């Protein structure tokens, strides 16, 4: 169990865009490709800029009648891509008040770099893939509210297709899909437990922040994501 959180107005979002997009096979890193005339990353950041949160506490979920807060955004980008991003921001007249941090060799390292840029003693932090532009302010807000109450909020959706597990000999067997969820971002956590979790050494099975937080011994709470909140990974996702 985590300690109760006093009402917090410290809301952070680490938006990771430090990857190379190898599966997209595009000359331009996928986070910079245009979608409806705007870079994918700009769409994503705009969803976070639109969020307004009341001070949140672990007792009530939120404390009404106090001023709404915005989210402090930390954008993680590879050093080599900073000029491209600056140029795109100029071209699209997009000048958000956000902090930019250099990424690492893996998603884990990129998140850790983003986390090191947060100096607040407490609060809540959402981690989101820069290449999930269809997230909504409502989902982001729900993730902050749940994390304030219980420590974590990881968005996911039920599996719609049938699922089979592949054995070592190449054979396959049906599994009960009701027992599985497809995990998305945002994944939102109380800052204190998130900082503890990211003191762990990186493990090969860390595919997201939930696996890091779970490895450190903290429980994971799932909340509803959306089927539209796709991660743009391969060219067909872009279509
Ligand atoms: N070293 C890394 C690797 C990934 N990411 C980010 O984590 C998110 C999810 O990763 P993924 O879709 O795998 O992106 P890439 O690593 O860029 O793609 P690929 O695996 O195809 O190379 C992306 O927003 C990506 O930019 C990151 O910040 N730093
Ligand atoms: C974090 C994530 O998007 C949750 O589904 C996913 O694990 C990222 O995986 P990737 O291989 O780094 O794209």
Image (cartoon, helix red, strand yellow):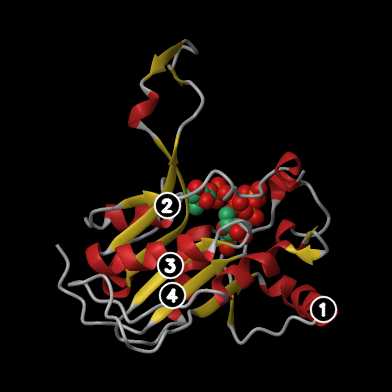
**Residue under pointer 4:** 115
Q: CA distance from mark 3 to mark 1?
A: 30 Å
In terms of secondary structure, where does tag 2 sit? strand
Residue at 48% across, 21% down = 162
Q: Nearer the viewer, mark 4 or mark 3?
A: 3
Q: Are marks 4 and 1 in contact (CB under 8 Å)?
A: no
Counting residues from the start of the chain, the first of labels 2 and 1 encountered is 1
Circle 1 residues within 10 Å: few <14, some 14–19, many ≥20: few
- Observer-nearest residue: 218 or 228? 228
- Element under disc 3: helix
Element class at badge 1:
helix
Percent coordinates x, y for residue 96 in the rendering: 65, 83
**On residue 36, which mark appears?**
none
Discs 4, 3 touching: Cβ within 8 Å? no
Q: Earlier in the sequence, mark 3 or mark 2?
A: 3
Asked if the residue under mark 2 is in contact with the one under mark 3, i.e. CB atoms within 8 Å, the reply is no
Label 4 crowd bin: few (<14), some (14–19), many (20+), radius 10 Å: many
The numbered disc on residue 87 is 1
Name the secondary structure under disc 4: helix
Q: Position of residue 160 (x, y in %)?
A: 49, 29
Q: CA distance from mark 4 to mark 3?
A: 20 Å
């Amino acid at each position: 169990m985590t300690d109760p959180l006093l009402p917090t107005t410290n809301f952070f979002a680490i938006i990771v865009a430090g990857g190379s997009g190898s599966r997209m096979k595009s000359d331009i890193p996928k986070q910079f490709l245009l979608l409806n005339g705007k870079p994918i990353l700009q769409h994503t950041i705009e969803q976070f800029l639109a969020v307004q949160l009341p001070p949140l506490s672990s007792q009530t979920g939120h404390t009404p009648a106090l001023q709404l807060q915005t989210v402090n955004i930390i954008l993680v980008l590879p050093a080599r891509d900073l000029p491209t991003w600056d140029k795109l921001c100029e071209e699209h007249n997009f000048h958000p008040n956000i902090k930019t941090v250099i990424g690492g060799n893996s998603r884990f390292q990129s998140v850790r770099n983003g986390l090191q840029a947060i100096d607040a003693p407490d609060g809540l932090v959402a981690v989101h893939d820069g290449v999930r532009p269809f997230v909504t302010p409502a989902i982001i807000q729900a993730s902050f509210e749940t994390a304030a109450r219980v420590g974590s909020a990881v968005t996911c959706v039920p599996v719609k297709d049938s699922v089979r597990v592949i054995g070592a000999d190449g054979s396959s067997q049906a599994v009960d899909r009701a027992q599985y969820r497809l995990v998305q971002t945002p994944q939102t956590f109380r800052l204190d437990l998130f900082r503890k979790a990211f003191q762990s050494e990186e493990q090969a099975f860390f595919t997201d922040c939930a696996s890091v937080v779970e490895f450190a011994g903290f429980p994971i709470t799932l909340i509803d994501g959306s089927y539209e909140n796709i991660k743009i990974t391969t060219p067909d996702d872009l279509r």
